[in-house]
Image (tube, rainbow, N blue to C red):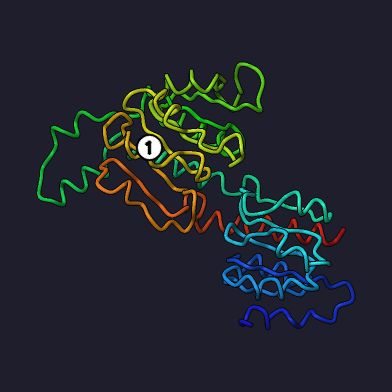
Amino acid sequence: MNLSIARFKIHLYDIDMSSILITEFISSQALETLGAKHEVVYEPDLYKDRSQLIAALQNIDALIVRNLTRVNEEILEGASKLRVVGRLGVGLENIDLPACSSRNISVIPATGANAESVAEYVVGAAVTLMRGFVPATHATLNGEWPRPRFSSYNECLGKTLGIVGFGSIGRVVAKKAHAFGFRCLAYDPMLQGSSVSLEHFSVPLMALNELLAQSDVVTLHLPFLPDTKNLFSANTLEKMKIGACLINTARGGIVDELELAERVRSGRIGGAAIDVFFSEPVKDLHHFIGIENLILTPHIAGVTHESNERVSQMIADEVNRFLAG
């Protein structure tokens, strides 16, 4: 038990007290919010020990996780009191939704709370890739002065950004990209109509192949589902505009990494920013070694100090509201 657990034991004997288990990092303010009304067990590394996790879930009313705690039949079987799972993020791939539904366990994601952070990452990555900042940095550090080479890279003004998946995050991306001078297009199989109106402009909706053919940068904002697994296979990647860049902050497994690496290495695709991987923490990225115009990050697009505060507080408030009935 750590200090955070002891800190909230003072509430143990309150009449209407519910018990909450948190197995990954949450902000201190959100912890205070939860601890003011409930007994809170905060073990931010508990996800690493499945047997301890299963034991800890006995007599727990609410579970709060990020993306590393696998909430499945194995741990739900003994969690007879569990009523709600709060997800500190938006992806639900680590939560067995049918298993939760069959037990009348509600699942609450932090929808929209990290959209600003992800959108900043996407636009920043788009500018970095289009201007070649990463290979220019490496060349300069190696004693070169490759000014003529990098003068052939492109600015964003007037270029086309294709947004694949046009939900809450995709729309914030469009607003930020529009301010940089990008023309934005969108593909989303869940949307109907010819366009989506935002504050001062509209974004045309079109078929995926049409979007790929026109876009200088393609950014992905789709959930990982059977229909989206390997959606960006060799066949799809070949439909991208020659020299276009790809950004994936959605989920690993949507993009075939080996096929992408081959095309960025050859120049068929101009560059890539990959923040998510099929298996995380990622162990082997040998296929990307030696590729110049490449950004690889450890699933941090939506993780900033500010977004952590927003995500944590949203889930704390929503779990409190749920437990209050």
Rendered view: 48 above or below 189: below
Q: Position of residue 143 (x, y in %)?
A: 10, 50
Residue placed under numbered mark 1 in the picture: 260
Camera-nearest residue between 321 and 107: 107
- Specify the amino acid type for callout 1: Leu
Left or right, 33 with respect to 102, comes to: left
- Foreground pick, 131 / 291: 291
Q: Does residue 81 appear left or right of residue 300 in this picture?
A: right
In this figure, what is the number of numbered marks? Answer: 1
Instruction: Give coordinates of residue 203: x percent, y percent.
Output: 55, 22
Residue at image position (64%, 78%) is: 4
Q: Residues within 10 Å of mark 1 (few under 14, many from 20)?
A: many
Q: Residue at x 78, y 70 (%)?
A: 60
Q: Secondary structure at mark 1?
A: helix
Rendered position, 155 above or below 255: above
Residue beneath the point at 78% across and 71% down: 19
Decide which of 251, 39 is in the foreground and name it.
251
Q: Is residue 235 above or below residue 119?
A: above
Residue at 57%, 36% in the rendered image: 228
- Left or right position of 9 against 269: right
